[in-house]
Amino acid sequence: MRMAYVVLTRLVGVAILVQFYFAAVGAFDRPQEDDSYSLHSINGMVVIPVLVLLATATAALLRAPGKLIGLTVAPLGLVVVQVLIIVLGNAVSGGADGDTTPAGLAILALHAVNGLVTMAVAGMAARRARELSKRPTAEVAPA
């Protein structure tokens, strides 16, 4: 079960790395169309949340420390923040012609910054999951 937790936390990290790749695919797609970011959207809205929830459930079943469980689920909260950044940035831009305002761009650019934070948090969770897997069983789930 511990190894499953380690693998799941690492898969979250890989999925986040792939998310950056899919963002680049969308950014360089010509012509830009509604589906340019479809891989990015599917990965971010389905794959990453499912992996985070599986990793969190595994951590809970292992009776990992509460802080570690919180760290494991944190990328899911950061995915929600990603969506809110897009919604807010688009609302501030508000142009029906699809143009973005400088204020909208400033907000939308936070999407990339939050993506980096999400990757860092997932990396911390994976590292701590690995540390947990090396501890004796009695330290992980006290009787």
Image (cartoon, grey):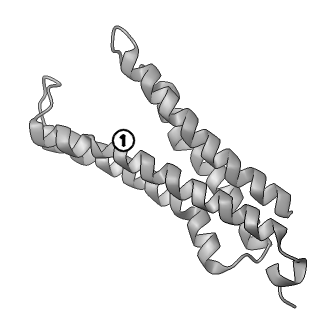
Name the element at disc 1: helix
Q: Residue at x 18, y 43 (%)?
A: 106
Q: Is 85 located above or below residue 141 in the figure?
A: above
What is the x, y in percent for residue 120? 51, 54
Q: Residue at x 42, y 22 (%)?
A: 26
Quadrant containing the C terminus in the rendered view: bottom right
Please, which residue is most extreme toward the bottom here? Answer: 143
What is the x, y in percent for residue 66? 63, 79
Q: Is residue 129 left or right of residue 114?
A: right
The crowding category of the residue bearing disc 1, from other C-alpha atoms within 10 Å (few below 14, some 14 to 19, many at least 20), is some
Quadrant containing the N terminus in the rendered view: bottom right
Q: Is residue 32 left or right of residue 95?
A: right
- Report the front residue among 101 and 10: 10
Instruction: Count every numbered label the image shows and give the total.
Output: 1
Q: Residue at x 58, y 50 (%)?
A: 49
Q: Residue at x 63, y 41 (%)?
A: 14
Q: Is residue 10 visible?
A: yes
What is the x, y in percent for residue 60? 72, 72
- Kind of residue indicated by mark 1: Ala
What is the x, y in percent for residue 5? 77, 59
Q: Is residue 102 left or right of residue 67?
A: left
Give the residue number, with chain letter if any, for mark 1. Answer: 112
Q: Is residue 35 visible?
A: no
- Report the front residue among 94 and 75: 75
Q: Is residue 103 left or right of residue 20?
A: left
